[in-house]
Image (tube, rainbow, N blue to C red):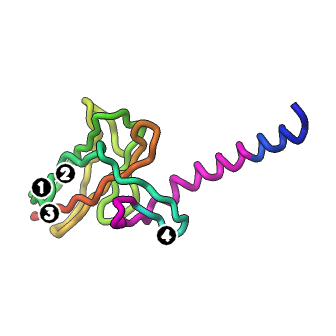
């Protein structure tokens, strides 16, 4: 292998690492577009909405009545990792157990909320549409 070929390969590997590291941080401010994709305005990265990744609980427009809630998320496909955001807040890691992904939510107040999930399904980064729900304590 020539020095020129080695340099090209090293440059490509470095570029891949930089892109991979910015993907994870660039997702925190995504918004839904009419074409059913999510776009981050700072990086213009498009994250497709998942067809097979879903928020199981709470269901759409459900009312939650307790001081602790456990979100249940799932997919018939292979999920490598999954995060959830509530009302556009920071992405929180979900845990995998019993064939589903879970997120325990504490210390919330009465009000209207929405949740969205973001993860890696079958090797592709995807997210769910926003799921609206209401908390009544």
* Chain part drawn in magenta: 12-37
**SS under mark 3:** strand
Which residue in the protein does label 4 denote?
41
Which percent across, then down, holds residue 68?
18, 52
Q: Residue at x 34, y 39 (%)?
A: 95
Q: Nearer the viewer, mark 4 or mark 1?
A: 4
Which residue in the protein does label 1 denote?
66
Residue 114 is labelled as none
Which percent across, then down, holds residue 70?
21, 47
Of the image marks 4 and 3, the number of the one nearer the N terminus: 4
Of the image marks 3 and 2, the number of the one nearer the N terminus: 2
- Inter-mark Cα distance, 4 to 2: 32 Å
Q: Nearer the viewer, mark 4 or mark 2?
A: 4
Of the image marks 4 and 1, the number of the one nearer the N terminus: 4
Whether residue 26 appears in magenta in the rendering, the answer is yes
- Inter-mark Cα distance, 1 to 3: 8 Å
Q: Is residue 24 left or right of residue 38?
A: right
Q: Residue at x 34, y 57 (%)?
A: 85
């Amino acid at each position: 292998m020539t020095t020129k070929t080695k340099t090209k390969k090293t440059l490509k590997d470095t570029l891949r690492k930089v892109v991979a590291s910015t993907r994870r941080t660039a997702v925190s401010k995504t918004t839904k577009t009419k074409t059913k994709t999510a776009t981050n305005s700072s990086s213009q990265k498009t994250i497709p909405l998942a067809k097979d990744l879903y928020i199981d609980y709470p269901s759409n427009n459900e009312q939650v009545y307790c001081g602790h809630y456990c979100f249940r998320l799932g997919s018939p496909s292979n999920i490598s990792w999954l995060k959830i955001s509530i009302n556009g807040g920071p992405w929180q890691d979900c845990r995998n157990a019993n064939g589903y992904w879970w997120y325990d939510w504490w210390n919330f107040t009465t009000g209207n909320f929405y949740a969205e999930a973001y993860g890696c399904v079958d090797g592709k980064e995807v997210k769910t549409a926003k799921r609206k729900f209401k908390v009544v304590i």
